[in-house]
Amino acid sequence: MSEEQDNLIVLTDEQGNEVEFEHIDSLEYEGKHYALLLPTGQEGEEQDAVVLAIENIDGEDVLVLPEDESVLDTVFELFKQNLDEEFDFEE
């Protein structure tokens, strides 16, 4: 398995469809861990990054959408600062 494939995560959306994401980065904020994911989609398509919290549930790491919108915004800004030279984040 290539290094690039190691960064791929398949999640299921609300409609039950499987969506493939690339894990771009992780960081810790206020004692919690977060992951920045980017849908793999086709080249040239506009892709929205997704920030998910990494929570340990029953001994297993699970990705969940943060409930606090202000925390989500702050964490996304931290990711943008960390990855400014690698990615062009559009508002």
Image: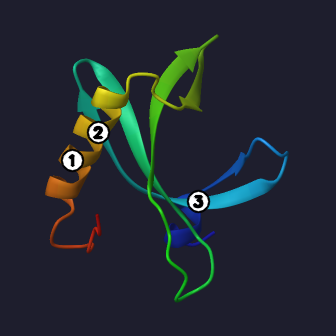
As drawn, the label of residue 57 is none
Q: Nearer the viewer, residue 47 or 10?
A: 47
| Quadrant location of the C terminus in the rendered image | bottom left
Q: Which residue is mark 3?
A: 21
Counting residues from the start of the chain, the first of labels 3 and 2 encountered is 3
- Residue depicted at 50% across the width and 77% down the height: 46
Amino acid under disc 3: Phe
In the displayed structure, does residue 89 sit left or right of residue 61?
Answer: left
Q: CA distance from mark 3 to mark 1?
A: 20 Å
Residue 22, compared with residue 2, is above or below; it is above
- Secondary structure of the residue carrying tag 2 is helix
Residue 86, compared with residue 52, is above or below; it is below
- Percent across and percent down for residue 71 are 29, 28
Counting residues from the start of the chain, the first of labels 3 and 1 encountered is 3
- Residue depicted at 25% across the width and 50% down the height: 79
- Secondary structure of the residue carrying tag 1 is helix
Q: Quadrant of residue 5?
A: bottom right
- Residue depicted at 76% across the width and 41% down the height: 14
Amino acid under disc 1: Glu
Q: In the rendered structure, are the residues bearing label 2 and label 1 in contact, judged by CB atoms less than 8 Å apart?
A: yes
- Residue depicted at 46% across the width and 22% down the height: 67
In the displayed structure, does residue 23 sit left or right of residue 40?
Answer: left
Q: Which residue is mark 2?
A: 73
Q: Which residue is mark 1?
A: 77
| Quadrant location of the N terminus in the rendered image | bottom right
